[in-house]
Image: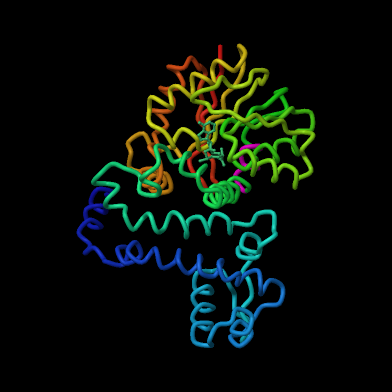
Amino acid sequence: METAKQEKQGQKPVSPVPLMEIATGFMRSKTLFAAVELELFTRISGTGADVADLGRLLSLDPRPAEMLLTACAALGLLVKRGARFYNSPLAEEYLVKGKPQYFGGRAMSLDRATYPAWRRLTEALKTNRAQEAPDQSTWTDALAANPERQRMFIESMHSRAVPEAPAIANAVDFSKFNQLLDVGGGSGAYCIELARRFPSLKVGLFDLPSALAIALEKIAEAGLTDRISTYRGDFFKDELPKGSDVLLLAHVLHDWGPDKDRLILGRCFAALPSGGTLILREAMMNDDKTGPLTAALMSLQMLNATEGRNYSWAEYTEWMEQAGFREIRRVELKTTGGSGLLIGRRP
Ligand SMILES: C[S@@+](CC[C@H](N)C(=O)[O-])C[C@H]1O[C@@H](n2cnc3c(N)ncnc32)[C@H](O)[C@@H]1O
């Protein structure tokens, strides 16, 4: 029965509707980016706006003001009551500047750094070379040489990490650990969440100097300077500081090729005591490499911006095993970054 039904379904003529959705996907993104850049959601938070109000607030003519409001409503970012448009719950929580979960940092980095580079995606595919900063030896050198881009990058990581941090804190029982080191910890968002949630956990963040300078600001803003230790270093040149019984390595390995990833995992193993735990956070690819879409697109982003790619659960597991980790388990996460965690133990 089922086969007959499937065959019948297979005979249905295919529709170009999904193709159109794929092809126009960038229009959705750019509508969001323009609205965030103009601070639409911030300016109308609480009050809402009709077309004339928005025109005044954002210095827009009525024609584009109406179009932008309509498009944002169609995207589910605004809701219309009478003649006025109000932030939807999604926009109110994530797109209003100053709110703790503000997603604007991610949106602006995608718009200003990622989007222009994706115009050269075909070139990246043909040359197997990153297009975001092709002249620099590594993407981290490129960021370190450009403070504005470095800040934009860390703000982007922060916007992604803030909503992910509670998911990680819920997925692992951190109360059983004494000391955590977040390796390549970026903005410090995970350290901040874990320090708040687990008052007896000692928390440390290891990153390159240029990134750490921005993390220090975030940690100070959170009032956690006394709780979070910071370590400047380069995991390709330096040993990781010892003393932690749990390491977090989040969205780091997808930036590099397999040899460098094995080196980083080796450093993590060496830094842990026997019985210590490594939590690897990545947008893992399915083992058959058919998706998921979030990981597959992130992988192309890695082609365009770094020397890495998003690897599969099986590949990361194999490298962790080669580094010496055992009892490796998979934990899927339903977050903006997708996929999940691989948690392994040093015997
Ligand atoms: C993609 S970001 C991820 C940041 C953070 N873990 C997160 O998930 O939000 C990669 C991080 O690795 C850091 N990093 C890159 N190369 C490094 C190196 N050689 N030594 C230490 N940190 C490095 C970057 O500065 C950045 O903070």
Q: Image point 28% across, 41% down: which residue?
A: 128
Count of marks overlaid on the render: 0
- The secondary structure that dominates the magenta segment is helix
Q: Image point 59% across, 40% down: which residue?
A: 211
Q: Is residue 166 left or right of residue 5?
A: right
Q: Nearer the viewer, residue 326 or 221?
A: 221
Q: Nearer the viewer, residue 325 or 301?
A: 301
Q: Is residue 148 left or right of residue 181?
A: left
Q: Position of residue 123 (x, y in %)?
A: 27, 50
Q: Image point 39% across, 48% down: which residue?
A: 297
Q: Nearer the viewer, residue 226 or 69?
A: 226
Does 344 appear above or below 5? above
Q: Give the position of the C terminus as an image quadrant.
A: top right
Does 11 appear above or below 194? below
Magenta region: which residues? 163-169
Q: Position of residue 288 (x, y in %)?
A: 32, 36
Q: Is residue 79 left or right of residue 1?
A: right
Does 126 appear above or below 234? below
